[in-house]
Amino acid sequence: MDRYSRIINKNCREIVLLKGYPCAWGKCTFCDYTEDNSRDLQEMIEVNSKVLSQVTGEFGVLEVINSGSCFEIPEKTLRLIRSIIKEKDINQLFLESHWIYRHKLQEMRDFMGIPIIFKIGVETFDNEFRQKVLNKQADFKTPQEVREYFDSPCIMVGIRGQSKEMIDDDIRILKEYFELGTINVYTNNTTDVRRDEELVKWFMEKYSYLEEDPSLEVLYLNTDFGVGD
């Protein structure tokens, strides 16, 4: 499992994949990332400390991810992150959170003491597909509601049952309402949710120009940031 990497093509930053407690929701139909979660506090602290020791601060920007939300990272690790921010002169932090924690985001900003770009796994702005098919438990109705709390949505493309129109609309919303976003091309995993190869091919042809868009990062594999397995 690779847990440290450097992103140098867009929005240059260091990125670490840490271990956290089980996802508070943990029922998304497409997600098996929760297998990296743990209830062993000592294990999490040891793994996270080793990973964070690799942070150099070379870009002044750090992204911290885990298989869930940043609020499920152990407190001792969060305090270590805060110390590294000061020691390495890091001036911007990327974190990810589920919609259910939206009212705690300012609490984390106050704790870390530097600007935070909060990501959220929206997956799609199509409410019915997000809630009934993907079971995201994110009951917002408009992109404006998301923008009130979060800075950078992550959407998925290429899932069986999605339509081209749905993907077109999601990308339009990303560009219209948000300064940053991530597009994940879905990869089959251990869940029953399957990839639509024709839809992926269509997306890659139509939206190839997004490779040059500084505001959107396209992940063709879930390890394209250099972390994960």
Image: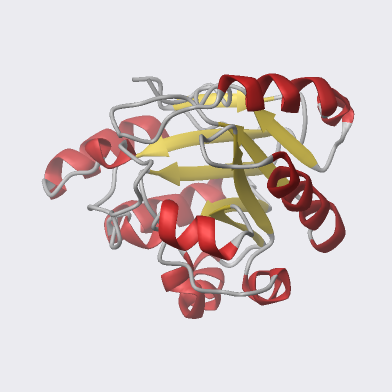
Quadrant of the rendering where the C terminus is positioned: top left
Residue 223 x %, y %: 50, 23
Visible residue check, residue 214? yes
Q: How is the image coloured?
A: secondary structure
Residue plotted at (28% across, 62% down): 24
The residue depicted at 62 percent of the width and 59 percent of the height is: 126
* Above or below, comparing residue 111 to residue 124 in the picture: below
- Residue 88 in view: no
12 and 134: which is toward the camera: 134
Question: Residue 180 or 28: which is nearer the viewer?
Answer: 28
Q: Position of residue 205 (x, y in %)?
A: 80, 20
| Extreme residue in the bottom direction | 103
Give residue 75's quadrant in the image: bottom left
Vertical comparison of 140 with 76: above or below: below
Q: Residue at the location (87% across, 34% down)?
A: 213
In the image, taking residue 135 as reference, residue 116 lies left or right, namely: right
As drawn, is 193 to the left or to the right of 223?
A: left
Image quadrant where one finds the N terminus: top left
- What number of labels is visible? 0
Looking at the picture, how far across and down is residue 217, in whole percent?
72, 35
**Residue at point 67%, 55% (across, down):** 152
- The spot of residue 71 in percent (x, y) is 37, 63
- Which residue is more in the foreground, 11 or 200? 200
Q: Quadrant of residue 30?
A: top left
**Up/down of 222 relative to 16, above or below:** above
